[in-house]
Amino acid sequence: MMQKIYPDAAAALDGLLFDGMHICAGGFGLCGIPERLIDAIRDAGTKELTIASNNAGIDGEGLGKLLRTRQVKKMISSYVGENKEFERQFLAKELEVEFCPQGTLAERCRAGGAGIPGFYTKTGVGTVVAEGKEVKQFANHDGVMEDYILERGIFADLCIIKGWKADTSGNLVFRKTARNFNQPMATAGKICVAEVEEIVEVGALDPDCIHLPGIYVKRLIDGSPYDKQIEFETTRERETA
């Protein structure tokens, strides 16, 4: 069996990084983001990156670290509202941005991983999302012809994801919201590198609970311990007795 476990993120990414590469990054907000791998890419200084990710982190956290060091040329994202540096670079025309509806982005990555070069969707018809894209009519369930736009599948040079647990073969389990985007991103590239909170022996995970088969994971690290990052910490005053 091929050895998949590496001692740290830098070792797991050794030989994979190059300027101008395309990366798919999992995570949802600051939940389930591949923190250790992002740090290793920052430290490697790899630049001119095109990154497909639901969002770009926040200032100084997640992919926001790579924006701050100006290593990103283009972002393909659905939500960028919490990152002021992202906003600044976009408005200053220092960063190319391809906005994509959230469900469409997930499907573009899933399609890329399944070898599907493109698909038609109704999402975005009649909006700026449809500009420059092929429009085709299909009959709906009532037989009425409706417009659909062609969206391209995404297939990257590298996928970086974060899971909860993995076994030594790379079979992987996500936890709750951290499953968002990590699963489709994992298949949408030439090689997938994963970081997890715990690595267990083969057989320790319930086969019925595996979210990502190990065949997709080529390199794996234990990135623990992690500090839980919160985008907006909201509290209320304790009620008096």
Image (spheres, helix red, strand yellow):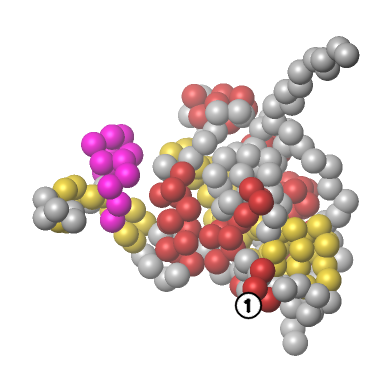
From the image, tell me which residue sits under label 1. 215
Quadrant location of the C terminus in the rendered image: top right
Specify whether residue 181 is painted magenta: no
Specify whether residue 121 is painted magenta: yes
Q: Which one is nearer the viewer's eye here, 157 or 81?
A: 81
Image check: 43 left or right of 91?
Answer: right
Toward the front, the furthest residue is: 241
Which amino acid, mark 1? Ile
Identify the residue shown where x is 38% and y is 67%: 116
Identify the residue shown where x is 77% and y is 37%: 229
Q: Which one is nearer the viewer's eye here, 125 or 85?
A: 125
Magenta stretch? Answer: 120-132
Identify the residue shown where x is 51% and y is 24%: 92
- Which percent across, then down, holds residue 210? 66, 70
Badge 1 element: helix
Q: Tell me which corner region of the image, top left, top right, bottom left or bottom right, holds residue 203.
A: bottom right
